[in-house]
Image: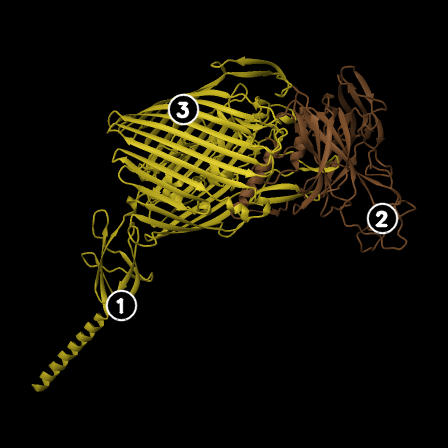
Amino acid sequence: MKTKILILITIFLLFHFNGLAQEAEKQRFVTIKITVRDSSDNSILKEAAVRVDFQKVYFSSDSTGVHTLYLRKGNYSLSINHLGYRAFNVKLSVNTQNINLNVNLVNVSRELDEVVVNSQGGNNNVARPLLGVNPLSIKMIKRIPAMMGETDVLRGLQMLPGVTSVGEAANGVNIRGGTTDQNLILLDDTPIFNPTHLFGLFSIFPPDAVSGLDLYKGGIPARFSGRASSVIDIFMINPSLEKFKMTGGISLVSNRLTVEQPLIKNKLGIMVSGRASFNDFMFRLGPPRLENIKANFYDLATKIYYKINTKNTLSFSGYLSKDFFQTDLLGTIGNVNATSTQYDYSTINASLKWFYAFNNKLNLQTVAVSTNYQPKTLLPELNSNNKVSIESGIKYHQLKSSLSYNTDLHKIEVGISSILYNINPGTLNPGTSQSVNYISAPEEKSIESGIYIEDEYALSKRLNLSFGLRYSQYWAMGPTTVRDYDPSLPKSDFSVIDSTFYQSGQSSANYGGFEPRLALKYTLSELSSIKFGYSLMRQYLQVVSNTTTPLPTSRWATSNKYIKPQVSQLFSIGYFKNAKDNIYEFSLEAYYRNTENIIDFKPGADFLFQPYIETQTLQGKGKAYGIELMLSKKKGAATGWINYTYSRALNQIKIGERFEEQINNGNWYATNFDRPHSFNATISIAQGKHHEFGFTFVYNTGRPFTLPNGFVEYNDVKYPFYLDRNNERIKDYHRLDFSWTIHNPSLKKKRWEGSWTFAVYNLYGRANAYSVYLRPENGLRAYQLTIFGSPIPSLTYNFKFL
Amino acid sequence: MNNQFIASINRLFLSVLILTGLYSCIDPYDVNFNQENKILVVQGLLTNDIENPDTIKIQYSVYTNGYTRAKPAWPFDVYFYLINSKQKIELVQTGIGIFVPPPNFSIEPSEKYTLNFTLYDAEKGEQKYQSSPQQASITPPILNIHDSFNPQSRLSEDGKKFVSSNDVFIDFQDPASQKNYYLWRYIHFEKLEECITCYSSIYSPYTESCIPMPGSRQPYYDYTCMTMCYGIMKSDKVNVFSDLASDGRLITGKRVAQIPFYFVSGCLVEIQQMCISPDAYTFYKNLESQTQTNGGLADTPPTAIVGNISNITNPEEKIVGYFSVVNIQKKRHWIDRATATGERSNILGHVVVHDPSPMAPLATCKKSATRTPFKPEGWQ
């Protein structure tokens, strides 16, 4: 019996000690209980992947969805992932206390405003009958690694398929084979004629004042007109009507500040955003020959938003931009003894918009627009306070009104618009100078009016139609003198046979016509569709430039008896497919555009003070075609897109048999921005709330340049002899950029939140050629100019006070 | 756009690049000029200077294997045609493809002239060429010339440093109420110490030329002049001007020459001023822009330097050159170089190396396009 008792005691003790040992072992660990829920409806999420220190993976959860982990004391990185949800990362300090963690994961399919998404829903890509439309939020543009810390709308656009430029310092972008002036760039309805600061290095749009943009490169709605290639519709943020907000930043190039202030709570608010560069001092740090150089810019944007009542809202947008440069290299006009040459460009834009809602379905929108673009060249005279100036300018006034009627079946809009152009082609203002005369090329006045209707409706369950029809009419107005030329001779001062003077109010030439816009969508499935598009655009205002990219001082000219309006027709077709709750988007688009009356210039053309621009220009045909593939991931911790474009852009100029009446013997030739292969990749990776990494990679075929066909000796000097324009290409362009943003490094939740962005532009230091040119040097030698030949690191501090 | 403004915009653009972080750079670029061409080149002016008429050169410029050379063209039936008086004036041949107007031929202000000639092509047969009609313009006289020493007048050929020069300026009165386009040339005389350079050869006083000297380690020798000798140099840059902004004004201080600082002693320069037609102005402006690009965004696309000569048998042919009829105004100016200091340029383009032989001969000064033993008029 005793023995049995002893055995039982022994067994008991063994079990007891084993249990004690187990308890003791357990007590060396701390229990972590994690409950994972969907943030939107608090439903339990089972089978979440829990990673500790990025290594071990646990898939344990009980029936209530609680994941239990046992961890020793110490510090751990915990990452909780679930398919379709944004990852949750946390630093965990494990002591003696057990921990209960409640984690709410955000379903990425509900994140609508993250990247390239349309404000109207997640599958617009497939569902709406629109082709060649790329909405781009400022949030995404800010994620793209910025050159020298300056968030740049135009550089962001160039990451999209079909958008290229002539190089890193281009005064605009080329969209689907169009010239820079064939893009209608609107900032809150006001047109922008010079979209860059510092000769194309930075775009003029203050990033904190912009909320986003729509790029229309294919199906252009009938409400837009006046340009042959595309529309870049940029909108400013509406001021907060609830509380004061402030954002800003400091970078090497500029300082920024944006404030939003409600004036009457929930009714009236104002936003003011300013940006200015203060970098003149750097020239004094450079070589002595740069000491007299000055280069500065600033821009100021404002928006006042007044919600009068439930039916009426009124908003005013204003924009001011100014650039000032000075060089000691003298431009010579007449016989001015100047001490330097100064360039002074300014833009003043304003728009006033009244929105009236008759009811939920019907509303009226009326906008008045005014733009004044004024480039000036100044020559300060030696031993005098006088400055001789060359002034030009564009004054643009527009009034437009549209009526929208939306039902479940239709989205109808009808509208009218009228634009008054006033162009000063050039005035030489001598001031008190005795060296030069007052010269002024006559002002060009013209009117462009339009009336349109557009509708979007379903023809059947699968077939949707977007239809627009615009009629535009243009009048070149007096006072003006129109010459008649001998038709058997090239237009020049020597072939004039007669001239007619038109009084103020008389029309010297008029053009007009219908501009149909059509898009058809055929739904293949809920997540895929094919589309077809056609649009015709007329352009009456163009830049006439003989430089690689238009200069801020380039001449703008409206159509007249001899400068015919440009007319482009675009045919496009596309296949669109979305996947995984619209997280992934795929599109394949092909297009063909032909343009009549593209404008080019005669050899040796000089536009300065030239009243009869037809004597310096030639008109011809353009064609562009291409295929664009794009895959984007719109939501999640890692977002971004990749795209590939094959495209060509060619021109043909032949108006006569003479040498000066044709280019390349009248054969098709590649434009300056013809870059057949283009590949872009943009990836943004969010690591928790505080870290964000961005990568972009760009590849383009090198742009064409003109190589001499040989050399000749003339008056004992060797000159290159050119016959064919753009007969060679510079080397291919590629570049990788990187950025790392640390949001709110203090980790404290305060109204003031700062962030640091470290970025490297051109990470592997590729010396991409901007241009190739010949220089006299023991004969002639070829050189390449590289704008950014090495990695450019930058550090930017941004802040917000919300 | 005005070339000077384009140059200043390009300069500013490149400076801004430097400002933005010194990341821009300019590197030699290997271009495969694997091209060959044979272009007919016509040079020359018909001027009112009867004593020293311009020569009219008609020759091919041939480019092969990276070298450009002149090739005789053998033109025949070369003449001026006077449109109003319907006269044909035969030109006098002074060399292969080189012609001058007949003696005492003078231009009439009201007459219109064309240059005409014929070439024989083995494949295409006879090819007839003709210039556009040209009428002499009236050129205002040069009122004043002055010069000023400029230590940073221009960049060296390799673009790495500044070279000093005496900048020469003129004043003239632009005629009112008419469009005028000006072209300037200059002839520059320097007294020479060395009369000839022999490359891989030595000078022979018997043949008055260089004779081969195989195996010489020194690539060249320079030989001192036996007598007084003057070098003749001509402007190698195109200099044109339009009175668009200063019609009828007194034009003062227009720079027309940059004479390098070769010697501390003075030199002589002859400035030639002429008014040309608007088309000729465009031609010379195109010529000027061919070599003034720097890759910046204000560069204009290059274009063929085709002038006003056309092949009327085969209009497709592109011919380089412009035939103009001009009234020429000349004025000479002595540059004393009194204020010139600093580093001097080598007039021969290299450091002078004399033949070390104790019997090294002196070289004669043979009259040519670049040398003269006769003291130029105006030499001080």
The residue beneath circle 1 is A73
Residue A210 in view, yes or no: no
Which picture quadrant has residue A156?
Answer: top left
Measure how far apart labels 3 and 1 are at the Cα level.
71 Å
Question: What residue type is disc 2 on?
Answer: Tyr
Question: What residue type is disc 1 on?
Answer: Lys
Q: Please, what secondary structure does the residue beneath circle 3 have?
A: strand
| Subunit ID for the residue under disc 2 | B
On the image, the x and y values in percent for residue A465 come to: 34, 28
Instruction: Left or right? Give the position of B260 relative to A586.
Output: right
On the image, the x and y values in percent for residue A714 come to: 73, 34
Q: Which chain is yellow?
A: A
Q: Which chain is brown?
A: B
Q: Could you say which disc has been placed on residue A398 in the image?
A: 3
Which picture quadrant has residue A21?
Answer: bottom left
> What quarter of the picture does the N terminus of chain A occupy?
bottom left
Q: Please, what secondary structure does the residue beneath circle 1 have?
A: loop
| Subunit ID for the residue under disc 3 | A
Which picture quadrant has residue B60?
Answer: top right
Nearest the camera: A353 or A439?
A439
